[in-house]
Image (tube, grey):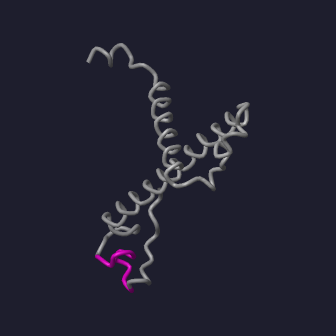
């Protein structure tokens, strides 16, 4: 993520961080504020990824449910993502995260012979 240009007019001084007002000598703001911005951005990306994974799990569940002969006896099987209770969404998110983690680990190439010996 690129650092933001300093908005010195907010503090009135081009040598102060636009976010916290402390003195800084680079154009992107102080390192502390930049680190906080990075953590916030990473956290947001993780939340979005969890949500996408949960929705994928639910989509697969719905596809499976529609194939079942007794689906009429279980109408809750066909509840779309947006109508699910938060606890059910969390289960789907966790399943998605776990499958992603296992799949990612399985997709990693095996270590080279020289790396395995060390």
Question: Looking at the image, which residue is at 63% across and 38% down?
Answer: 61
Q: How far from the left and from the top, in percent, is residue 13?
A: 36, 83
The residue most toward the front is: 73
Residue in front for this viewpoint, 60 or 72:
72
Q: Is residue 37 left or right of residue 88?
A: left
Question: Looking at the image, which residue is at 38% across and 84% down?
Answer: 11
Q: Is residue 2 left or right of residue 65?
A: left
Q: Is residue 17 magenta?
A: yes
Q: How far from the left and from the top, in percent, is residue 83?
A: 63, 55
Residue in front for this viewpoint, 105 or 79:
79
Q: Is residue 20 above or below residue 88?
A: below
Q: Is residue 83 left or right of residue 19?
A: right
Residue in front for this viewpoint, 83 or 35:
83
Q: How many marks?
A: 0
Q: Is residue 113 above or below residue 65?
A: above
Instruction: Work out which quarter of the rendered image holds the C terminus and state it.
Output: top left
- Residue 71 in which image quadrant: top right
Residue range highlighted in magenta? 12-22
The residue most toward the left is: 118
Q: Is residue 113 above or below residue 102?
A: above
Q: Is residue 42 above or below residue 108?
A: below
Q: Is residue 77 magenta?
A: no
Main secondary structure of the magenta stretch: loop
- Residue 19 in which image quadrant: bottom left
Question: Looking at the image, which residue is at 46% across and 69% down?
Answer: 5
Q: How far from the left and from the top, in percent, is residue 50?
A: 50, 47
Q: How far from the left and from the top, in percent, is residue 7?
A: 45, 77
């Amino acid at each position: 993520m690129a650092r933001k240009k300093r908005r010195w007019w907010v503090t009135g001084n081009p040598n102060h961080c636009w976010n916290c007002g402390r003195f800084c000598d680079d154009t992107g703001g102080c390192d502390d504020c930049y680190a906080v911005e990075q953590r916030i951005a990473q956290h947001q990306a993780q939340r979005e990824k969890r949500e996408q994974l949960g929705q994928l799990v639910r989509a697969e569940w719905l596809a499976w449910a529609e194939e079942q002969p007794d689906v009429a006896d279980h109408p809750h099987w066909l509840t779309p993502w947006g109508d699910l209770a938060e606890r059910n969404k969390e289960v789907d998110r966790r399943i998605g995260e776990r499958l992603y983690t296992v799949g990612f680990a399985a997709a990693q190439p095996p270590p080279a012979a020289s790396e395995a010996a060390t």
